[in-house]
Image (tube, helix red, strand yellow):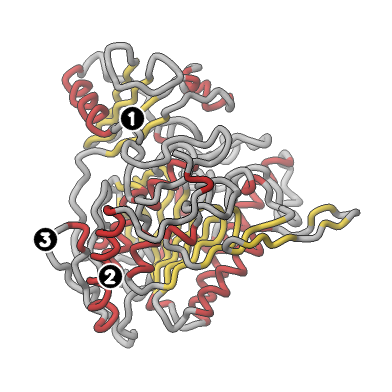
Amino acid sequence: MNGARQRPSAVPPPSRRRFLRGVAATAAGAAAAGAAAALAVRGEGASRPRPLPAPAGARRRRPNVVLVVADDLGHGELGSYGQRRMRTPRLDRLAAEGMRFTCFYAGAPVCAPSRCTLLTGRHVGHARVRDNPRGTDAPLRPQDVTFGMALHKAGYRTGLFGKWGFGGPDPHTDSHPNDKGFEEFFGYLSHKEAHSHFPLKLWENRTPVRFPANRRRGRTVYAPEVIVQRGLQFMERHRKEPFLLVLALPLPHAPSLVPGDPYPRKPWRAPDRGHAAQIGLLDSYVGRLVDKLAELGLTDDTLVFFTADNGPHEEDGVDPDFFGARGGLRGYKRNLYEGGIRVPLIVWGPGHLTRTRGAVNARPAAMWDLFPTFTDLAGLGPAEGDGISLRGALTGRGDPPRHEYLYWARPTGDRRTPRAARTERGRTWRAAAAVRFGDWKLIGYAPGRRYSPPDDTWSLELYDLRSDPAETTDLAPARPEVVERGIGYLRKAWTPPE
């Protein structure tokens, strides 16, 4: 499939057409009365969710949804998750006033597939994009429905600001954010572009926005700052309408560069000071976003979600162990151990989380749960897919059903990072997969670099996460019946890519 040069079709593929027709039908009632309506993707017989309660004095409107996605942020890099060297006061305050998830998982141990699971609500065994690009970014298919498409069709104003990464730098594709439900886009189209924090250009929808370079000072425009400004302007323009804002900042991804240095007096290595400065900026940007909501009078009308796309990186000379970035877990970015895939999730919304202030949710949940959560909170019901809506847990009206299993894969091996390689005893060159079912977690390594269905050639490890969250003791030899159960889930979860 070569979607990189195709223009969007005037007629959506059948599955996408059915989905959007159903959303449009339910959105009419939601927009008229702010009441919940069932999302047609579940088919006939779907139960109608009760509308969200309106807090005293609040306007009756569907809640705005704001999602902030950090890039390569470890489970232990925020104060509310145990960080002691770096300060994150604004995010810590959101955790204290909202809900903090302590067992939330990214979609994959690297960026592109993780963000695909987020956008589409499909885990990596079913998603279109399953690995990081080795060249041009893989595109989303025309039939891939995103939560942006669902909410936009339902009457939300939608914007994505920051990193996209599906389809490469060509703006004339049917995998562009504008074709995937985000009517406003500003930022990086490709993964490669997002590796520059001081770029010569960003994209506004399909138009390049170029920045001048100073001969003495080099590139002078710090992209995260401009991206945040655009996001704040989006909220101001649409303050009288329900909106979905996705802020996908390239922080704290390498290179560890910032304008200035908030840690000049720390006797740390330069890469670590730069990394800490990036996280400090990320925290301040979230603070500015929350302050803007207050300025616009939208605090009670908005839910803010903060998470990350995978575990901590070790690139550009950064030492994640210096910061305890893994939060006591095993693994880093690219590993399927907990440190590579368990990430923070903070949800804040004073108008909707009044009964869960400061709550901690330890039930396993994953990135692909956010799609159905957003549609459910918007009054459309939970969308069909691999995810489960978290609305009940967030609003204090009951916990969501438990997942039968959670699944991750690394379809292609990768040798690039030494700490990740040591964690796997040199096996990062091999394809791998993992599944969590209850408190059990099975990790398997294929015999070679390319993914193949699990069989007798795979190496398997089994961990009991309740008693051993750091995955120190392999129980596979002692519990063969549990291993067999896990192998069944590994086989069930993976479908061959189209």
Q: Secondary structure at mark 2?
A: helix
In the image, taking residue 459 as reference, residue 188 lies left or right, namely right
Residue 398: percent from the left, percent from the top? 18, 61
Of pointers 2 and 1, the one earlier in the residue sequence: 2
Of pointers 3 and 1, the one earlier in the residue sequence: 3
Residue 160: percent from the left, percent from the top? 50, 62
Q: Amino acid at mark 2?
A: Ala
Q: Are the residues tagged 2 and 1 within 8 Å (C-beta)?
A: no
Can you tell which mark lies on residue 24?
Answer: 2
Kindly report which numbered mark, 2 or 1, lies closer to the viewer in this rendering. 2
* Residue sitting farthest toward the top: 457
Q: How packed is label 1: few (under 14 Cα within 10 Å), some, or many (20 or more)?
A: many
Q: How packed is label 2: few (under 14 Cα within 10 Å), some, or many (20 or more)?
A: many
* Residue sitting farthest toward the front: 10
* Residue holding disc 3: 44
Can you tell which mark lies on residue 434?
Answer: 1
In this rendering, the answer to whether 433 lies above or below 257 is above
Distance Cα–Cα, label 2 vs label 1: 37 Å
Which residue is at 26% across, 34% downward?
A: 493
